[in-house]
Amino acid sequence: MTNPDLERKVLEAVPTGLLIGGEWRPAASGATTKVEDPSTGEVLAEVADAGPEDGMAALAAAHEAQAGFAAMAPRERGEILRRAYEAMIGRADDLALLMTLEMGKPLAESRGEVTYAAEFFRWFAEEAVRIGGGYATAPAGGSRFLVMKQPVGPCVFITPWNFPLAMGTRKIGPAIAAGCTVVIKPAPQTPLSMLALGQLLLDAGLPAGVLNVITATDAAGVMEPIITDGRARKLSFTGSTGVGKILLRQCADKVLRTSMELGGNASFLVFDDADLDKAVEGAMLAKMRNMGEACTAANRFYVQRGVAEEFAAKLAERMGGLKVGRGTEEGVQVGPLVDAKGREKVVDLVGDAVENGAQVKVGGRAADGPGYFYPPTVLVDVPKESRLNHEEIFGPVAPISVFDTESEALAAANATEFGLVNYVFTENLNRALRVSEKLESGMVGLNTGLVSNPAAPFGGIKESGLGREGGTVGIEEFLEVKYVAIGGLG
Ligand code: NAP
């Protein structure tokens, strides 16, 4: 239930400055930027708007803290993460409300994200004490190989607005576990969750300078000097493929290690041997989590002819029954899109498909009034060349096309430069494995609409990215391997 007093209290508790060297401070220029509630367009808060000078101060703080932090006992680093995990769970309701206010997703989803985000801290608290190494005899005998793993060094993180906490903890967790210091810039639409997390980590005992948070509207102007300076040794970015490519070029200058979690264009394949109710359930999750504003969102539905009509009817019924509104209101299942630009894109993509001959089963028209709402929409008979088959929709729109054969479905699914995730629904084990092997993506959802899990390796291939976050490989992204050749042992 919407509670203005509680909202004010939660907002007032968030630091609004830049976190540099363990202290909160205003931008050197004194500039601030406004944070909006996407369900009303009203201003929620003003936060510091960093300039290049602040960015370099944050980098200097991270650089200065690096050697000391790398020397901290792994158990101690793990315990900081464990305390932060417990604090997040303990404060889940406040953190969820804050996230809903600045990002728009319904409270239940925000609560889910707080738990998911906190789990990265718990997982990497456990990984901090399992950083291994090796010792071996050379094949020809004589010399020995000693292999050790050391922190990469100061890291730069840039995160998007769609998962304001989880996209941060997925990077900060392994960095702290590995002994790396950090400069992080959250998205300008959703800085409050990250600022709250910064304070929470300080309270959990993170030493000054290990995590530096800078909020900035001039992302390129502030981040490029940090990336090209040479003191930072790694960039981890989550965001669009276009921006990822710009950042990769900047990283080339000083040969930074990079992790890139970029855009997606997931297909959702339903074969006629699928359990249709399971497929509809999976579709709701893969499409509607975060109002469709997820890199993992099902972007294109391909359904085998025998079940296409029934699947579309069932999905349209479920989508049409969802309650749209401000995320703080009781029973709301679909919040607003994040901003006017995001909604305009959805309007354009649906308009283009309909002009090309797609039929609207449900939704299809942006709501009037304040806030950036767009109704859950199902389109059928979507022509191949429609823009929404090639671009990320990032909204609650499910375009359905029909296929006849497995090879036709695979060709359609793989006909994209993206390769983050695909979803497959079939009860035939051979087909399930065959199709999973042939899909060109870093992840496959097999009879499930949700793949994200802190204990699993998340990431894409092709233009969806480089590297993996989470799982046992997640920490490796923050470790360098050093090999010592040992001679003289006979
Ligand atoms: P975006 O426009 O690429 O922005 C992401 C972040 O990069 C923001 O903080 C943004 O700040 C910053 N940025 C933009 N240009 C920059 C530059 N030249 N130098 C430094 N920083 C820059 O993406 P978005 O629209 O916020 O997020 C949606 C995208 O993220 C989608 O493509 C989605 O698929 C992808 N995503 C991927 C994953 C994954 O794990 N693969 C997860 C979530 C989201 P400004 O807004 O101020 O420019």
Image: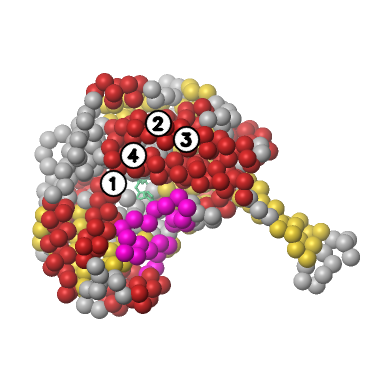
Q: Is residue 310 visible?
A: yes
**What residue does disc 3 label?**
86
**What residue does disc 2 label?**
91
Q: Is mark 4 within 8 Å of ligand 1?
A: no
Which numbered tag is attached to residue 111? Answer: 4
Judge the density around disc 2: few (<14), some (14-19), many (≥20) Cα neighbours within 10 Å.
few
Magenta: main secondary structure = loop
**What residue does disc 1 label?**
290
Q: Is residue 359 above or below residue 406?
A: above
Which of the image's four quarters has the N terminus?
top left
Question: Is 474 positioned to the left or the right of 33 in the image?
Answer: right
- The three-letter amino acid code for the residue at tag 3 is Glu
Residue range of the region highlighted in magenta in the rendering = 438-459
State the CA–CA distance, disc 2 to disc 1: 21 Å
Answer whether residue 253 is magenta in the image: no
State the CA–CA distance, disc 4 to disc 3: 14 Å
Quadrant of the rendered image containing residue 350 = bottom left
Q: Is residue 480 above or below residue 157?
A: below
Mark closer to the chain start, 2 or 4: 2
